[in-house]
Image (tube, rainbow, N blue to C red):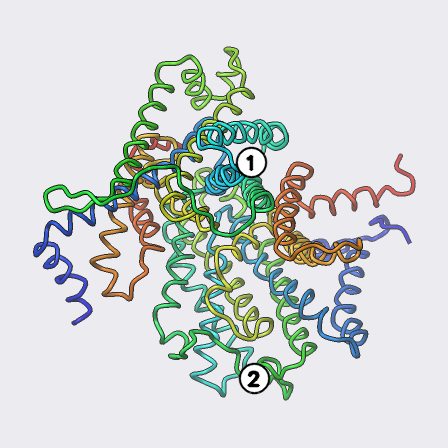
Amino acid sequence: MFYREAGQFKTSYTSDQAIFPIRQDLWFIALVLLAAFVAVPLLMQGADDYMYQAVLIPFLILSLAAIGLNILTGYAGLLSLGTGAFMAVGAYATYKITTSFPGLDIIVVFILAGLVTAGVGIVFGLPSLRIKGFYLAVATLAAQFFILWLFNKVPWFYNYFPSGTITAPPREFMGVLVTGPEASAQSRYLLVLSFVTVLALLAKNLIRGRIGRQWMAIRDMDIAAEIIGIRLLPNKLLAFAISSFYCGVAGALYVFSYLGSAETEAFDILLSFNVLFMIIIGGLGSILGSFLGAAFIILLPVLLTNAPQFLGFAMRADMQKHIEFMVFGALIIIFLIAEPRGLARLWQIAKEKLRRWPFPY
Amino acid sequence: MDFLNAILVTPFVEIADSPVFFAEVAINGLLTGVMYSLVALGFVLIFKASGVFNFAQGIMVLFAALTLVGLMEHGAPVWLALILTVGVMIALAFAIERLMLRHLVNQEQIILFMATIGLAFFLEGFGETLWGSNVKKLDVGIPDMPLEFGGILLSSFDLIAALIGAVLVASLAIFFQKTAIGRALRAVADDHQAALSVGIPLKTIWIIVWSVSGMVALVAGIMWGAKSGVQFSLSLIALKALPVLILGGFTSVPGAIIGGLIIGVGEKIAEVYWGPAVGGAIENWFAYMLALAFLLFRPQGLFGERIIERV
């Protein structure tokens, strides 16, 4: 079974414009989804939650955030350093809505929280019409610091809880507990996975269509885009809104399905940078890249933390932390030098090679 | 109503009540502003010469201060430690050019920006691996006593810091305007290709620029470190330098200075007079909001070159 599109004839425009025009790609995605939805829960039945809690759930949630940022930065070309704050908006909105209306379905709550975040994103996206590039990045930093400060200072947001944290209350979906401390890792994983699958597919379709093309035109040169009749303000604001929606849902899942309870520190600027790293390393302007980048950034610290033990020498904890920082920084630089267009580009090259294999000429 | 009162009326009443205190707050803000300016200056130098938005500037401040303190803890006298640290910063500039910038020529700005974030991570880990991560006291022998001028209380340390900052800025200005290297730097800042074509060695210029910003970082590190101890939070002032840059314009040295002063004063006054009304700690974001409001009216900053775009 070779990786070829030869012999796969398209008889209609619809089939020609399918997301995965090559049949093998379609099978591959189906296989991955099958593995994620069925095989992983089955295999992990008896195992402890480490794999879920340390790798799979954060990977999926941060992939979602990375898709959100990629829509804004990779597709619409608007650099943002406020991802953490938008995720915080999603988390706090979910908390407020679900504690005010405990009867509301948690899925609906997540989506409502995403919409709230989209609104906030539009407000902070307003300056994007006049400024761009690094100036805009600093403007989004204003969002980052202001929003977190607001959540810290106004007790209404955390229901006047003395410690200032928000805690995920137990909520059920179709009779299964999916959030709160009692929910099993497996159910939380499946909830996150479903959200990520649906939203990733939506994003993929969004950027293939008219809206995505308009964004890319704006990214490549906004003045030229304006001249060919693309309205900048609505499109840029739409990019902010949709990107914030994704980040908001990711932030909601981050607290409700991953951390369980959180303060504003969980969403500080380091998180924003981490998500930015993900899309740069994964590849700007690529949905697949968001996943690859998230996997890289999540797995790297896990590997670095465990590496000394595997190699058989012990280190002082603080020393190890510093060396982790060094290796992380160095790897990012090396990576940028080796392949500035990210892991998605490597994947593409591999696919090109595979198409000719085993007879390259 | 109370809230509006606390925002719109009370602060002005307080200011009118005791102008001396207001002056004290403003001058304190100015002195903090000098520190911001120093960090922003390092940014501007690098941005002008190489178009790199150097996020690692804040960490360079920390790294320089850490190296200085570390050397002094190992028994080196102040002057020797200073010289050695300058040497380290120059070596660092060499290493950055050789290992990082050279390989990233012609990449997009965002890639270069990300690379400097990677550099920031690396330097932070490196500095703390070498010298440890606990808070260190830096004492370079600048006296710190209260002085009084016409009822306004000032610290002699702050005054000396401001003076050193002013001297540094003046000497940089002379360096840029009068020397051959300075002229070459300005040529590179103007147009890379044109500079190359008249025979200006771009790589040497980059090394010089990064070394100079390393030294500016050292001065900033000494000032901040002597005031509040050498610790990780030192690198966070780099984030404060960003609104300063926006206010002054990315490419303007005087802009960095004046922007720093405006932010320093504005932030202090807002915190003291308006902070209590909204629960305090507004220093964290006030600078950004000020810069943001400012951007809406002048996208290129106070002194930045006018942005002209063509299709």
Position of B43 compared to A192: left or right? left
Q: Could you tell me which residue is drawn at 38 percent across and 33 percent down?
A: B41
Q: A121 or A317, which is in the foreground?
A: A317
Q: Secondary structure at mark 1?
A: loop
Instruction: Measure the C-alpha gap from mark 2 to mark 1.
Output: 46 Å
Three-letter amino acid code at the position of disc 2 = Arg
The chain ID associated with circle 2 is A
Q: Which residue is mark 2?
A: A171
Q: B299 or A357, which is in the foreground?
A: B299
Q: Is residue A295 visible?
A: yes
Three-letter amino acid code at the position of disc 1 = Glu
The chain ID associated with circle 1 is B
- Marker disc for residue A351: none
Q: Which residue is mark 1?
A: B108
Q: Which quarter of the figure is the C terminus of chain A placed in?
A: top right
Above or below: residue A166 compared with residue B238: below
